[in-house]
Image: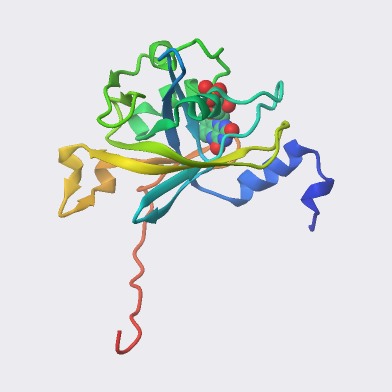
């Protein structure tokens, strides 16, 4: 099968994309609006970019229902700040509930019973039930269109990292304890540490 994605309906193209790029980590993004009201939503078009400066990015698409901007993007445009909370398996259901299309004034923390803890460097609160938090300031938004199926790439600079003490061992995060989950296609998720294997990277001679 071979297809030019430009000839597809955006929903068909989306299915090919999420079936090809997987598993995807999940950024559970907390933001506040201009009035300080909180918002929380998951995004799996998410990755780290580089370490110095520490940069991450994620991509909110425009809503498939009405073509409108998602609250997360609108809030980041207004405040220039967000927190990426890393989702462990223990809060998978609440994370999924935050993906419902709530109006902007609805606080998903309250809807799902997740707890807020203050951040150190930015206004949006962190999710207490998450073990790793990346506090970010906006570096750049790359707009790739403004219609259903298109989206924006939000690039953030990480200004503060929080890791639960029990997970931090010898300068590394213990991923067995973090229990991260990944998103597959459709409604399927994967446990990131259930079936791992090691590959030693060979070093070139003289290096
Ligand atoms: C696991 C998961 C991953 C998601 N990833 C994305 C994504 O990468 N981009 C996107 O636009 N929406 C994604 N969504 C849907 C958004 O979470 C959903 O549209 C949400 O209502 C946006 O909330 P907001 O309007 O408060 O920003 C995802 C949903 C789930 C459950």
Residue under the image location 24 percent in, 48 percent down: 173
Question: Which quadrant does the N terminus fall into?
Answer: bottom right
Q: Quadrant of residue 50?
A: bottom left
Residue at the outermost bottom position: 206
Question: Which of the two residues, 40 or 122, is positioned nearer the viewer here?
Answer: 122
What x and y, as percent, mark residue 131? 27, 35
Residue 187 visible (yes or no): no
131 to 103, vertically: above or below: below
Quadrant where ligand 1 appears: top right
**Residue pushed farthest right?**
7
Residue nearest the viewer, comparing 23 with 108? 108
Question: Is residue 21 toward the left or the right of residue 118 in the image?
Answer: right
- 133 relative to 145 in the view: left or right: left
Q: Nearer the viewer, residue 141 or 114?
A: 141
**Does any portion of residue 37 appear in the rendered image?**
yes
Circle count: 0
Is 67 displayed left or right of 103 in the figure?
Answer: right
Please tell me which residue is depicted at 80% across the width and 54% down the height of the picture. 3
Above or below, 103 relative to 169: above
Give me the residue at 28% from left, 39% from top.
Answer: 160
Is 105 situated above or below 158? above
Could you say which quadrant of the image residue 164 lies in? top left
Looking at the rendering, in which quadrant would you find the C terminus?
bottom left
For the point 25% across and 30% down, the residue is 120
Where does residue 18 sit, x and y in percent of width and height?
Answer: 61, 44
Colour setup of the view: rainbow
């Amino acid at each position: 099968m071979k297809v030019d994605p430009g000839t597809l309906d955006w929903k068909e193209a989306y299915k090919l994309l999420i079936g090809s790029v997987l598993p995807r980590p999940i950024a559970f993004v907390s933001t506040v609006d201009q009035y300080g009201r909180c918002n929380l939503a998951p995004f799996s078009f998410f990755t780290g970019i580089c370490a110095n400066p520490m940069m991450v990015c994620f991509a909110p698409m425009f809503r498939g229902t009405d073509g409108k901007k998602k609250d997360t993007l609108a809030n980041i445009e207004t405040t220039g700040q967000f927190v990426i909370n890393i989702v462990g398996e223990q809060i998978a259901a609440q994370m999924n509930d935050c993906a419902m299309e709530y109006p902007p004034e609805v606080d998903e923390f309250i809807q799902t019973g997740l707890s807020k803890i203050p951040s150190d460097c930015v206004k949006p609160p962190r999710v207490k039930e998450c073990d790793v938090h990346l506090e970010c300031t906006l570096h750049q938004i790359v707009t790739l269109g403004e219609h259903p199926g298109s989206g924006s790439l939000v690039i953030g600079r990480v200004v503060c990292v929080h890791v639960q003490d029990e997970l931090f061992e010898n300068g590394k995060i213990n991923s067995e304890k973090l229990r991260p989950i990944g998103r597959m296609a459709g409604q399927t998720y994967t446990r990131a540490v259930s079936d791992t294997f090691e590959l030693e990277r060979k070093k070139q001679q003289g290096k």
